[in-house]
Image: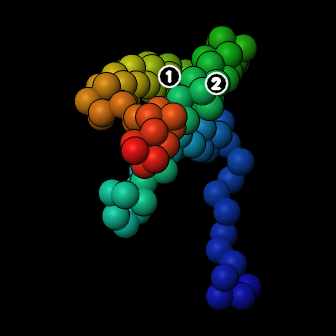
Amino acid sequence: MSDQEYPLPPPTFEFLILSLKAQTEMHLGMYHFGEEKDRPAPDFRIARHTIDLMAMLQEKTRGNITLEEQRLVENAVTELRFRFVQAKENHDRKAAAQPAPEPAQKKEEQAGA
């Protein structure tokens, strides 16, 4: 095994749900590294899609997974739906607080005057 290789976790239902949850949190802008200005903008479309995907897995696996797995997916979907609403409201509030950019035509008229 080289220095860059590391063991991968087993491909379990739990790992799938936790991976999808982490991806959704990333798309909601919850993870950032370094400076605040380096934080990528949230992608609510992809976050919503991943939450819907997890809800579909929840429905399709009902009765075919352990009680612990069922609780994991239910809790993840519920938590992510709540976080989605919070992140969207925060994003919309910040966007509304920023001044609207001036139209390009006004800038050109001011520059030429």
Query: Looking at the picture, how far across and down is residue 82, in whole percent?
Result: 38, 20
Q: Is residue 67 left or right of residue 59?
A: left
Q: Is residue 103 left or right of residue 35?
A: right
Residue assigned mark 2: 49
x 65%, y 88%: residue: 3
Instruction: Work out whether 2 lies above or below 77.
Output: below
x 50%, y 22%: residue: 77
Q: Nearer the viewer, mark 1 or mark 2?
A: 2
x 51%, y 37%: residue: 104
Q: CA distance from mark 1 to mark 2?
A: 12 Å
For the residue pair 17 and 38, the one nearer the viewer reads as 38
Q: Quadrant of the N terminus?
A: bottom right
Residue assigned mark 1: 77
Amino acid found under the numbered disc labelled 2 = His
Sequence-first disc among 1 and 2: 2
Amino acid found under the numbered disc labelled 1 = Val
x 40%, y 44%: residue: 113
Query: Which quarter of the picture shows residue 18?
Result: top right
In the picture, the disc for residue 21 is: none
Q: Is residue 28 visible?
A: no
Q: Is residue 105 visible?
A: yes
Query: Looking at the picture, how far across and down is residue 73, in whole percent?
Result: 54, 25
